[in-house]
Amino acid sequence: MLAALTTSLRDLRRERVRSWELTADPDTGLTSRVEPVGPPGPVSAPRRAILRRTLDMIREDVDAAMLRDPAAHSRVEMFLASSGLHAIWAHRVAHSLWGNPSTRLVARLLSQIVRALTGVEIHPGATIGRRFFIDHGMGVVIGETTEIGDDVMLYHGVTLGGRSLSKTKRHPTLGNRVTVGAGAKILGPILLGDDSQIGANSVVVKDVPAGYVAIGIPAQVRPAIAGLTPEEMLDHNPAIWI
């Protein structure tokens, strides 16, 4: 009885461990080992959701770039050739890595590789909203504690920098629908209100109220003209032009 029980347990263990089967060739009689292959498992719902959000984000960014760049001829062109879009897409990956202390070095290395490829340096710690666009995408620097809202547009040569060596909030905060002209320097933990616009080559070191325009060195702040959209303000204030 003990021998029979031992044999039964051994057979049961073998059936649990072995996931393969032996099959015999009808012509030769040779046996071969066949591993069972089941149907591929379904993609989990969280993965599908992440993929969907990523595709929606890319489509949204490309559409925003098409609206703001008169030199763009197609969405495919913008997707393949816009260094500003490439920089922000890479930043979103780096920013997600920055949230984990164990992958911060990887995030920094990724940002430096993208800097070499695109000419745009965005610190992985910077927080950037939706539909962000950098036209021409060269010479732009965005510091670690920078915060940027939605629908913001920067031209080339813009610096969002700091004026302190302290490890605190030391870079600017940009509201929604802010436009920053070519070569402008926005320095320190200041606030640019919603719909504000910064002229080309301006140096801004003080807050700019929502809807106002800042032009010059140091930047002089003046109210926007009532009734004009941000795009129309570009025509009315040539200094904002690139």
Image: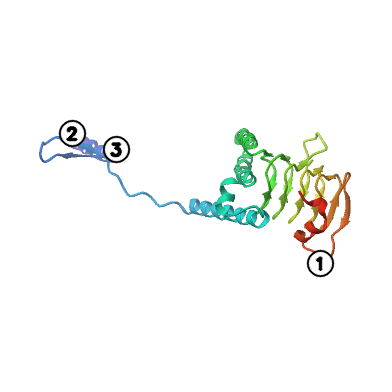
SS of the residue at dot 2?
Answer: helix
Judge left or right: residue 26 versus residue 229.
Answer: left
Alpha carbons under labels 1 and 3: distance apart: 76 Å
Q: For the residue carrying disc 2, how many other residues have a C-alpha within 10 Å: few (<14), some (14-19), or many (20+)?
A: few
Residue closest to the eye, 144 or 42? 144
User: Please, what is the three-letter code of the amino acid marked with disc 2?
Assistant: Ala
User: Please, what is the three-letter code of the amino acid marked with disc 3?
Assistant: Val
Q: Earlier in the sequence, mark 3 or mark 2?
A: 2
Quadrant of the image containing the N terminus: top left
Q: Is residue 198 visible?
A: no
Above-or-below relation of 90 to 57 = above
Residue situated furthest bottom in the rendering: 227
User: Please, what is the three-letter code of the amino acid marked with disc 1?
Assistant: Gly
Q: Earlier in the sequence, mark 2 or mark 1?
A: 2
Q: Is residue 147 visible?
A: yes
The quarter holding residue 9 reads top left
Q: x, y percentage for residue 171?
A: 78, 42
Residue hosting label 3: 17
Residue name at image x 83 percent, y 38 percent: 163
Residue hosting label 1: 227
